[in-house]
Each structure stands twice: as C-alpha cells, then as structure tokens.
Amino acid sequence: MSITTQPRKRRKEDRPAELMTAALGLFVEKGFAATRLEDVALCAGVSKGTLYLYFDSKEALFKSVIQEGVVPVLVEGEGIAARHEGNAFELLEKLLANWWAGIGETNFAGIPKLMVAEARNFPEVAQFYYENVIRRGRALLGSALERGMASGEFARLDVETTIDVVIAPVLMLFIWRYSLAGCQSTPADPRQYMAIHLSLLRAGLKGSQV
Amino acid sequence: MSITTQPRKRRKEDRPAELMTAALGLFVEKGFAATRLEDVALCAGVSKGTLYLYFDSKEALFKSVIQEGVVPVLVEGEGIAARHEGNAFELLEKLLANWWAGIGETNFAGIPKLMVAEARNFPEVAQFYYENVIRRGRALLGSALERGMASGEFARLDVETTIDVVIAPVLMLFIWRYSLAGCQSTPADPRQYMAIHLSLLRAGLKGSQV
DNA sequence: TAAATTAATGACCACTGAGTCATTAATTTA
DNA sequence: TAAATTAATGACTCAGTGGTCATTAATTTA
C-alpha cells in the first residue's frame, strides 16, 4: 500500500454541508473556542484554506450551522401548534416530541451547552442565537401555555417565568449529556427523567378545569 | 504626579486568598480556558510569576477555588439536614435558602456554568468537581427526598432521577445568569422563578400523606 | 549594620491556532 | 487540445498565552 496523494476532487456543491456537519460535531464536542478550524476541515476531508473559501470566519461558520440545523425544527413546531386541536397539555407533549426527534436525538442537542459556554466570550454569536432560536422557541412554548391558561386547563401563572421553569429541566438534560456525562453525573435514563418532569408539570400546572 | 514604581510589599499570608478571589471573578466571567493567568495576577495586584509561587498550575488554582469556596457551603447544608426536625418539604426549602445565601448570591453561582462549559476539555477538573461537590450535593438532596418518601409526605419516585429534576431549574437559573443574561434571556425575576418552581414541586411531589 | 533569606518581578521561551495568499491542478470553454 | 477559469492546497504570518527562571529588593537574622 503506497501513500499516494489523493486527486483533489472539486465538489463545490457539497462542501458547505459537509463542513457544517463536521463543525457541529467538533463544536459540541470541544466547544467553539477550543475547536481548531484545521480539524473541522480535516474532518470534512478538505484543507483549512478550502474552509475559508466557503465561510468568512469561524463565527460565520457557526451561524450557518444554527441557521441550517436548528431553525427548521422550530418552524416545524410552529406548524404543529397551528394545526393542533386537542388540549394544551397534549400540545406541550407534541412539541416536546418534535423537539426531541429533531434536536434531542441529534448532535444539535449539544448547542445549548455550547451557547451557554461561549455566550459571554462571543456576544455576537449569542445575540444571533437569541434572536433566531431562543426568542422564537419561547414564543412557541408561551403560546401553548397561554392556550391552557385561557381555557382554564392550567392555573394562571406568569407566562414568561413559567416558560423558563418548564424548559429548564429539558435544557439541563441536554447540557448534562454534553458536559459532565463522563462523570456519571447525568440522569441514567432520560426517558424516566422526562416522565418525572412531565408528571410534576401535569400536577403542578393544573388549574380550575372549566 | 510622577510615575513611581510601587514598593513591593511582601504579604505571603494574604496572597493565596486574594489570588483565588481574583481567579473566581475572572473564571466565571470569561471561562477557565479564556482566562489569562496574567490577568488574574494583575487583578490580585501581583505579577504572573508571583501567582506561580503559590499555585502549581492553572488547574491547581481552580481546584483551590472550589475547595475553599464551595465545599464549606455543602458542609453547612449537611449540618442543617442533620439538625432538621420538621417535614421534608420544609427541609428542602431550608437547604435551598442556605445554598442561595452561600452560593447563589456570590460569584460562586458562576461555577455551574463554568463546569458545564469546561468539563469536556478539562476532565481532571471535572472529576474533582464531581467528587467534591456534585456527589456530595446529590447525597444531601437525596436524603431529604427519601425522608419525605418514607413518611408518605412525597410520592414514591426514583430518587436519583428526582434529584435531577428538582435541581435542574436551580442550576439553569445560575447558568442563565452567567451566560445569556446579556440578551434578556434569563428570568427577569429570580424570586418569582423560584416561587413557581417550588409551587410546581409542592403539588407534584405530593404523596399519600400518612 | 552586614549577611542571609526569600517574596516578588518581568523578560523570555515554546507552542498554538486564526486567517492569508501564492501556487497547483481539475474542469470548462473556445 | 490549448487557454482560461476556479476549486483546492498548505506554508506562512502574527498575535496571544502557559509556564520558567535569573534577577531584584524587602525583610529577617546574626
């Protein structure tokens, strides 16, 4: 087996997606600052120079990853909410299931940890994430809660704050998975964890049923 | 006003504590990897070389910060649990109040974000934190939950997983404060946030009162 | 007060990684 | 098939940082 230099294939169409996939994997594994662009390029089978052909900077690469990967799942969720006709708690469960399939079971689940870790040091990236993901996700969840409060299915609580309390355990689950999981400091059984969270919610949110 | 070189005061006794305070502030502000030891030294009013007189490495400095700052609060909590005589939910509230005063209202509240952010890249530090803080904190919280389940005050749920669900919103509150707070993506009113969390818990944990 | 001790300094080294650009070669066009 | 185009390369620059160590000077000891 001789070491031959690969012929350089030219595949302009596929490079950006391949680079974004490689970047996501390394970003969630090592963090934004600690990821070397040369490794991203290597992982995508190109050289560092090629990466700069398609993305202006490390930050631009990261923004693309968010835009192409996370935003579509939110759009799906918005469609689900618009079409939903059952009670509000069922909508919450549907939204969660969609989020789980599109984010929770993919490398995108690592993004919350990533953002939390890097927000202070890369405020421009944080701002982008806030505008495009957080704000939109909160609006979606808030509309489900308001629906339940309006119908009397849920108790009347401050909506913005309740969003935070409802979403926090889900975010922490993702964050644990990508941080301290190596120390067995993460819920052993995410399914059970979510079941308990939902059962606490079901009992705790309950209002005066109309 | 002439620029005069300060006389170098020799204050062997105070340096370590001053360096640790400076380090905590910068670590929670910028993260472990992104904090320059020269800045820590500057912030403590000494030169970088002096820092190495008292701490072997960046990691050693960080471990000292944890050991001196966080562990004592856990020890206090263990004392509170041992002396407590009321019902289990009251114990939970007491432990929370103690945690809040000793951690939540200090720079130490930034440590959870710090650990989450850096765990993967500094496994030795993560291991140290797990052994000395997480394991111990979980044991403390678990004992309070078990007390409630044994008396029938709480429903019987898987203890380990319930610990996670109970603690997650508290951790997320701290994490938000030190990450995306700049984007208004943090609960505006922590007091209300905790009130809602506790009210969900009170209703959700309730068991068949004996 | 002279000598010994040691707290404190900061220039320096070795290494790293983002971003550049002159060069190479695959592909297209004439 | 020769010329033009452009995808791809990788050596290079440059700024930054953890850690070292020979030197300086504050304090203590004799």
Image (cartoon, coloured by chain):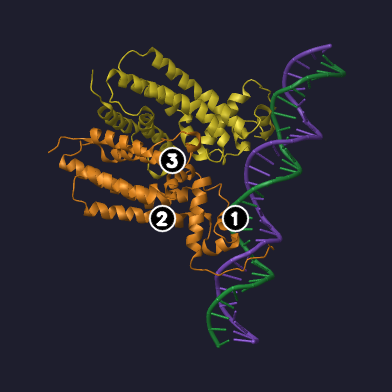
Chain colours: A yellow, B orange, C purple, D green
In the rendered image, the vertical position of residue D5 relative to residue C8, given as above or below: above
Q: CA distance from mark 1 to mark 2?
A: 22 Å
SS at circle 1: helix
**Amino acid marked by disc 2:** Gly
In the image, which disc is placed on residue B69? Answer: 2
Q: Amino acid at mark 3?
A: Ile
Q: Nearer the viewer, residue D1 or B136?
A: B136
Residue A174 in picture, x, y percent from top left? 42, 34
**A166 horizontally vs B147: left or right:** right
Q: Position of residue B5 (x, y in %)?
A: 66, 65
Instruction: Write down the residue under mark 1.
Output: B38
Report, in whole angstroms, how far the alpha carbon at label 2 lies from the one at label 3: 18 Å
The quadrant of the picture occupied by the C terminus of chain A is top left
Please indicate, yes or no, whether residue A4 appears anywhere in the rendered image: no
Res. B143 in view: yes
Q: Mark 1, chain letter?
A: B
Quarter of the picture holding the N terminus of chain A = top right
Identify residue for label 3. B175
Estimate how packed mark 1 is, as few (under 14), some (14 to 19) or many (20 or more) residues with alpha carbons within 10 Å. some
Q: Chain of mark 3?
A: B
Identify whether B77 is placed above or below A26: below
Chain letter belonging to callout 2: B
Coordinates of residue A129 in the picture (x, y in percent): 52, 30
Which comes sooner in the sequence, label 2 or label 3? Answer: 2
Looking at marks 3 and 1 on the same chain, the residue that comes earlier in the sequence is marked by 1
Q: Nearer the viewer, residue A191 or B95?
A: B95
Q: Are marks 1 and 2 in contact (CB under 8 Å)?
A: no
Q: Which residue shows up at 43% across the image and 19% down it?
A: A77
Tell if the residue under mark 1 belongs to the same chain as the one under mark 2. Answer: yes
Q: Three-letter amino acid code at disc 1?
A: Glu
